[in-house]
Amino acid sequence: MVTQQKEQAFVLLELMNHMVLVAQEAKRRGFRVVALNHDPLNPSGAFAVPDGTVDELLHIDSWTDAERVRETVHALHERYDVAGTYAAFEPTLTFEAELRELAGLPNNGPQNIAQVIDKAHVRRKLYAEGLSELRSVPLAEALEWDAWQFTRPAVLKPAHGTGSALCFIVSSLEELRTAAGRTEAAAVVSALTKEYILAHGDFILEELAEGELVSVESVVDRGTVHTVGITGRYISSLDAVVEQGFIFPYEHPRAAEIAAKAAEIHHSLGVVHGPTHLEFIISADGRAELIDFNARTIGLAVVVCIGNAYDIDYAAPLTDIACGIEPDLSFLGKAPKASVDMLLLPPAGTTELTELVFPEGTECRRITKPFGQPLSGRTDQLDVVGMFVVTADTAEEAHHKALAARRDTLINGAPLGDDPNNQLVQPTYIPASALTERTPA
């Protein structure tokens, strides 16, 4: 009896944003591209999914319905020779790991990934092993305190969260109770993110690390951690948890030490394959404290920035890793360019978006709020209305271009200019001559 050979498929779980670049690369390689999605495929903008890219679209009613999703995953395994998978959204990661395990692809194991995306578990493990100095407690326990138990401020955040949603800095019981009330409202713009957070419901209170926020981008190939580079951050001068931009690569003087700490944490958590995005706070004396481990690629358009900086199609090595193929990483080293992805808040007090016009010289432009939709008027990560990318030959030039483009962006007919919501804390190690740029510290 001759067994019919299965068609090779490349499976993407909740295809969104930069994932379309990986889908297109998989399509070029001749795979049948299958997407498991709750949301419709993006029809417009910088990350629109071109017609013909996806061969089969399977609707997922809810990523929190584990039994139904697992049935879909197992059915895919039965129908196809799954040659590769790619996921970049936390609720999908355990299902991707299970599919990879079924397909015999290099993987981190679904049970292990379930622990890796549990921020409370990660903090406890790293603290116990001496890889973290930050203490944390469940929110329910903290709300029973009679007095503030930490010696410094803390961050209240979901134990299962994504994209800095519902994170609050507090330094007293009164502030904690107020923030806890805001978590109950769960005012998260993305319905998928809201569903993910509420499905778990647990929040943790974690000591605040003080210093500069950076992230380490890596690809892990069957146990070997390859550092792609460090990403620097622009943050709001009004709220330290509101990220407003990313620069890649970021030439931090302690880059080697930070990358070494990242590799050690990978080994501790048993993450042996796939792209990762680790966020660190670097203290004034150079200590690197992990604040978030993400078993996925960095979000927004930083994948575009990485490709621009190295002058490559970064989707190619990501697809190699997804297929269990040893990637060509010969491009790693000194990047010939620098690239910035900027996030835009509307002017302070704006309660409705009616117009957004990006200046010339920007690319990968994204409008993230529908025109006419009410806005909160606050300075909040979830109130970002637009994003764009700029690239230049040096970090200094990219920095200047990015800040000029921010000021020149028209929101509701007026340039953003020096509005309070456009005041940034910039990366510490931007070249000194760039520090004359008109941005407050």
Image: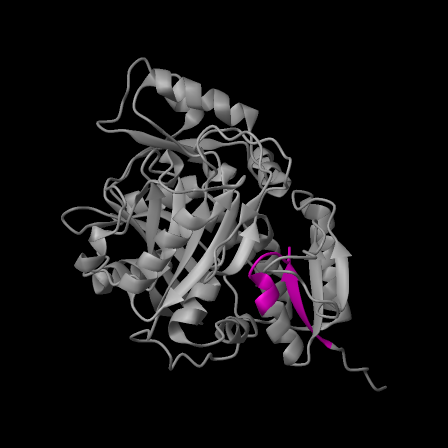
Task: Give percent across and percent down for residue 260.
Answer: 26, 63
Answer whether residue 223 is visible to the viewer in this image: no
From the viewer's side, name the closer residue of 285 and 222: 285
- Quick check: 50 left or right of 266? right
Residue ranking furthest to the bottom:
2
Residue furthest toward the left? 285
Q: Is residue 19 magenta?
A: yes
The residue depicted at 49 percent of the width and 29 percent of the height is 377
Q: Which residue is at the far front?
A: 413
User: Is residue 125 at all visible to an observer of this figure?
Assistant: yes
Residue 301 point in image, percent of width and height: 49, 58
Look at the image and give the residue range highlighted in magenta.
Answer: 8-21
When the figure is inspected, residue 343 is found, relative to residue 83, above or below; the finding is: above
The answer to which of 226 and 249 lies nearer the viewer is 249
Residue depicted at x 30% and y 76%: 333
Question: 223 left or right of 372?
Answer: left
Where 95 falls versus 84 (above or below)? Answer: above
Q: Is residue 330 left or right of residue 131?
A: right
What quarter of the picture does the C terminus occupy? top left
Identify whether 335 is placed above or below 363: below
